[in-house]
Image (cartoon, rainbow, N blue to C red):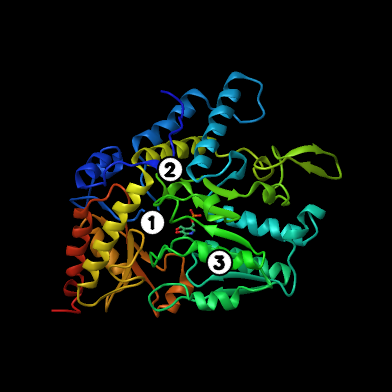
Amino acid sequence: MAPVVSTPSTLQHAAAAMDNAEVLRIRNDFPILGQEVNGHPLVYLDSGATSQNPASVLEAEQEFYEQRNAAVHRGAHYLAVEATEVFEAARGIVARFVGARGDEIIWTSNATEAINLVSYAFSNASAGRGGAAAERFRLGPGDEIVATEMEHHANLIPWQELAFRTGATFRYIPVDDDGALRLEEAARIIGPRTRILAFTHASNVLGTINPVDTLVAMAREHDAFVVLDACQSVPHLPVDVKALDVDFAAFSGHKMLGPTGVGVLYGKAGLLNAMPPFLTGGSMITTVTMEQAEYLPAPQRFEAGTQKISQAVALAAAVDYLAETGMDRIHAWEAHLGQRLVAGLEAIEGVRVVGPGAGIERIGLAAFDVDGVHSHDVGQFLDDQGIAVRVGHHCAQPLHRRLGLVSTTRASTYLYNTTEDVDALLDAVAGVRRFFGVAK
Ligand SMILES: Cc1ncc(COP(=O)(O)O)c(C=O)c1O
């Protein structure tokens, strides 16, 4: 089997819109989706948590282990050279997918680690590491870090912790009742003291797509760094980090048809090369004495120890798959599914959808509350019919508190979901309250 290959930018894809017939063909590429669960064909509506893998991704990982497995960047033998080549080619493929340069892409274990990497680099700089070059990353009392009320814990707690470690103040932009950021509040909160603005591109609960341009402009006015949580955007819509002009962006392989265990941090090269490292050890140094070490430039500077090599190679195969399908087409299809979901759920008595209402832009997911029935019961009821959804607070407890809820049920779509999948969920949800005896 050939190693991973690059494909042209998805942004130029101009083919016809996706439809159910194409989705059914796509679905054939995903071995796991062909099974039955509890006597029903599996309806997988939990891709917002973890997506499924096409055969090409599974094969890429297997091919790596069968043909090329070795540690990268340090061997002088054939397999080590092969492994290094496909590992670095994978970096290039992922970089092009988001409009970045190869040396601006850092492999991490997941998005959570990517965001922590940035947070700890700022901490280390604040503790005096990194010399004069890292001065711009130093935080202290009087400085402010701003996030939003709709963040996943992965883009919230690392900033709270950074504030605790440095004495900076943590602040947040509130959301309105429809799940949009209150931009007039953002304009008040983001000011001369703001050093970091961290926010999600698309909410994993509300489905809201945030106005990156507006928020970046507010940050730039005050020379603040911008960290974008792109976990729910890079897998589902065309994203160009340069066009967005963010300083850092994080996403996870397993949410975009790739394997678990690999995530990505994008950072502007000038920033990455000035930042002190997060994890330290082998493979990220130039010279080491018994007293100290000198570090390589990015990306190796942030890739201590043996890397997630097969996972990176498989993630590149996932990116190839997405690029061939076309991110603009995937986005349009999922927007269609998302609207169908919201309109259908809103029409069911006793169901409250959180986030933008029907007709307002959102990604292809919807989280909802069923009056009188706990989300875990809703999830169990749906699972009995072969429908996989996520239940709970979706790692967004403050947002749920803001919405006056403890938990919700979330259905999230991807390129392998048909309108029939959405309708199966809607039919099932329509029967939940009767089943649990809270409606006639
Ligand atoms: C918006 C958002 N941010 C961050 C994460 C964390 O991703 P991971 O658990 O892969 O690090 C998720 C995962 O659900 C997410 O949806």
Element assignment for label 1: loop
Dividing the picture into quarters, in which one does residue 26 lie?
top left
417 and 437: which is toward the camera: 417
| Separation of residues labelled 2 and 3 (CA atoms) | 25 Å
Q: Position of residue 161 (x, y in %)?
A: 64, 67
Residue at which label 1 appears: 48
170 relative position to 286: left or right? left
Q: Residues within 10 Å of mark 3 (few under 14, many from 20)?
A: many
| Separation of residues labelled 1 and 3 (CA atoms) | 18 Å
Element assignment for label 2: loop
Q: Earlier in the sequence, mark 2 or mark 1?
A: 1
Q: Earlier in the sequence, mark 2 or mark 3?
A: 3
Q: Residue at x 24, y 72 (%)?
A: 346
283 relative position to 404: left or right? right
**Of all residues shown, which one is farthest toward the left?**
440
Q: Earlier in the sequence, mark 1 or mark 3?
A: 1
Mark seen at residue 156? 3
Q: Residue at x 47, y 64 (%)?
A: 211
Q: Position of residue 193 (x, y in %)?
A: 69, 73
Ligand 1 has an atom within 8 Å of the beta carbon of the residue at disc 1? yes
384 and 155: which is toward the camera: 155
274 relative position to 208: left or right? right
Mark seen at residue 258? 2
Say what amino acid the circle numbered 1 marks: Gly
Q: Position of residue 181 (x, y in %)?
A: 47, 72
One can see residue 279 in this view: no
Taking 325 as reference, is 405 above or below it?
Answer: below
Taking 242 as reference, is 433 above or below it?
Answer: below
326 relative position to 292: left or right? left
